[in-house]
Amino acid sequence: MTGDFAFCLRARDGAARRGQFATAHGTVETPAFMPVGTAATVKAMRPEDVAATGAQIILANTYHLMLRPGPERIAALGGLHRFMNWPGPILTDSGGYQVMSLAKLRAIDEQGVTFRSHLDGARFTLTPERSVEIQRLLGADIAMAFDECTPFPAEEEEARRSMELSMRWAARSKAAYRARPGQALFGIVQGSVYPGLRRRSAAALVEIGFDGYAVGGLAVGEGQERMFAVLDETVPALPADRPHYLMGVGKPADLVGAVRRGIDLFDCVLPTRSGRTAQAFTRRGTVNLRNARHADDPRPLDAECACATCRQYSRAYLHHLVRAQEILAPMLLTAHNLRYYADLMAEMRGAIEQGRFEDLAAGIAARQEEGDIPPV
Amino acid sequence: MTGDFAFCLRARDGAARRGQFATAHGTVETPAFMPVGTAATVKAMRPEDVAATGAQIILANTYHLMLRPGPERIAALGGLHRFMNWPGPILTDSGGYQVMSLAKLRAIDEQGVTFRSHLDGARFTLTPERSVEIQRLLGADIAMAFDECTPFPAEEEEARRSMELSMRWAARSKAAYRARPGQALFGIVQGSVYPGLRRRSAAALVEIGFDGYAVGGLAVGEGQERMFAVLDETVPALPADRPHYLMGVGKPADLVGAVRRGIDLFDCVLPTRSGRTAQAFTRRGTVNLRNARHADDPRPLDAECACATCRQYSRAYLHHLVRAQEILAPMLLTAHNLRYYADLMAEMRGAIEQGRFEDLAAGIAARQEEGDIPPV
């Protein structure tokens, strides 16, 4: 690819899209949510457990894998799929976001970013060319163009300068990528909260030509309302025959609102990270299992959830595991949260096919607002 | 029981025994190793994963469950099996050992032990009667008599005083127990390293009458040689038609040596705890996955092991997970270690049936001494 990447739109409901794309490691039904497997593992989950939640594709982080264990090592061991025993599709990010949020002593210039590892202070350089090379070494099914994640808030002039740099890096990413069989390349729209910049960024990416288009630089503190406003301006400027990926998003209501605006793909650490901090997502809102109200509660976390955690364990037991700091707590809660996210996406796919997306969205919001079941 | 507990001896090879006993939650083929599920979870393992390793019965700790979440709460939630979703047999210890090793500000008298929780300083009293009551509330398939774990080293006079107290407590445990349907009660031989005391203790327990007989107060620093010497003196004094349980043991070579001396049942935190500290048991000795020699090694931990960890992951990946402090590391290593222990027990059972236990034991020792495979 790029050029042969097959994205098939099967249905629309308003701006919401029901699609499908194929990779060398399997087909992804969209809208889809990607669990995050930062360091070549979706934390606290075995790969077969991830697949059992209904997840179809996972994301891995170029930044983390570059530092440890190193992309050349992973390539020598047969690539990321084999290394981590995940046979399904993998999307890798470009490293740009983590360099800005995690690395120390960064220096950005036209060439790229030089930084020190947050692990041991070792010096690294990441350029569009190196980012694409790393993602090739990892064997990603979908690689991302290298970009600068514009800080928030940013004045328009700063946002413009940053976006234009990302667009030059996008062109270099594409040039370095050189259409590899079995790997797709997505570009990333930047431009902060400025509609004009977002539209110019989208146009620049379309001019370069990518297999898919991501919206970056959101979920960085701008709030849901402004995020949706950016999507309202940006998504219509993206090619309709390509997948639209909203990076790093988000809460269940964010996903519903973004699908409504034409987004097809998401990733976020929220379900996995929450699973390690006793937070569970349910059809009636979030539940904190650390709370003493659950200590004697024989009921499942979410009575409507078919996951193994909800079928096999009481809130009382989950509360006990959390209090005792048992590893099984993140294992069971992460599995549930990923299942909740996968179910939410599956419900949205079904509703789009049947032309009842707005009904579903209203129903989800109403249930979430009801709040958790009262204590026993 | 007691009295109806069915232990069936199927074969002998020297002093080694191949047996079987039934519980309300399933049959246990002996010799058997019990993974430790301290706080109502075998750490880093889902119950179905524990069963998949070949484990037939697990141990849970009365002391830990008494402090948190409390036996009355577990009983109200349907008992320990249901609470933790383990459908197989469960043996609970009596709490005596953990009170001595973990609790603060202990005071022992004839009545029992008063102590403060190591978690929050709350005051508790444990007596033979309360220990038996807790184990009934938990719904253990096998309960243990309440004893004092004699400190090591102990002068003979101190060991005698402690053993005699444990024997009086054993009689009170039996009296409090009152033959509950579906629950067996085992007594515990004490007497430190003194053969005369061990034999007197065994005789006292037989006089009281138990469904099985445990050897306690070992693996507390006396060393393998002295432990085996105690077994040589003690096991012949135990009823041959009852299971013999060596508590808190041990390393693979300890298990082989104890089975050779007529032990049928074991528990130990070693395979699970080691799994959380990057230590793996293999047919060629122990392996530390933290060691840099594994960083590029595409081979499995133990090529002869059929566990999911060895079938699906390289040493390089396990090393990476350990270095990155990923939760998946204890998950995969604990599963492997428990499988190693279960396989070792199954091999010993097969060898006893076929009258080739000594050959097996010699083979295991020779392989262990070979040491790990050389680096790639």
Image (cartoon, coloured by chain):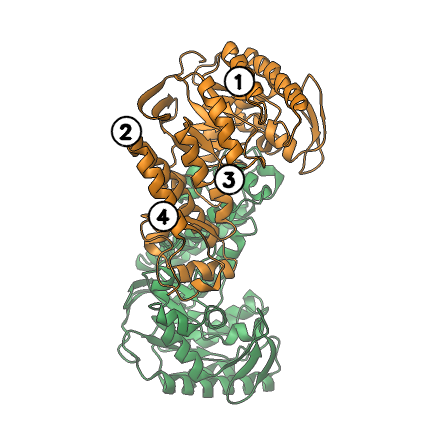
Chain colours: A orange, B green
Q: Which mark is residue A269?
A: 3
**Image spot of residue B274 (x, y percent):** 53, 54
Which secondary structure, mark 2?
A: helix
Residue under label 1: A199
Residue under label 2: A353
Residue at 55% from the left image edge and 17% from the top image edge: A201
Query: Cβ–Cβ below 8 Å for labels 2 and 3?
Result: no
In the rendered view, would you say A118 is above or below B272?
above
- Within 10 Å of disc 1 (Cα), the crowding (few <14, some 14-19, many 20+) is many
Query: Cβ–Cβ below 8 Å for labels 3 and 4?
Result: no
Q: Which mark is residue A367?
A: 4
**Image spot of residue A77 (x, y percent):** 51, 28
Residue A143 in view, yes or no: yes
Task: Give, as a three-letter code, the residue at label 2.
Answer: Glu
Which secondary structure, mark 1?
A: helix
Q: Nearer the viewer, mark 3 or mark 1?
A: 1
Location of residue B263 (image quadrant): bottom left
Q: In the depicted view, which residue is nearer to us: A208 or B21?
A: A208
**Image spot of residue A150 (x, y percent):** 62, 27
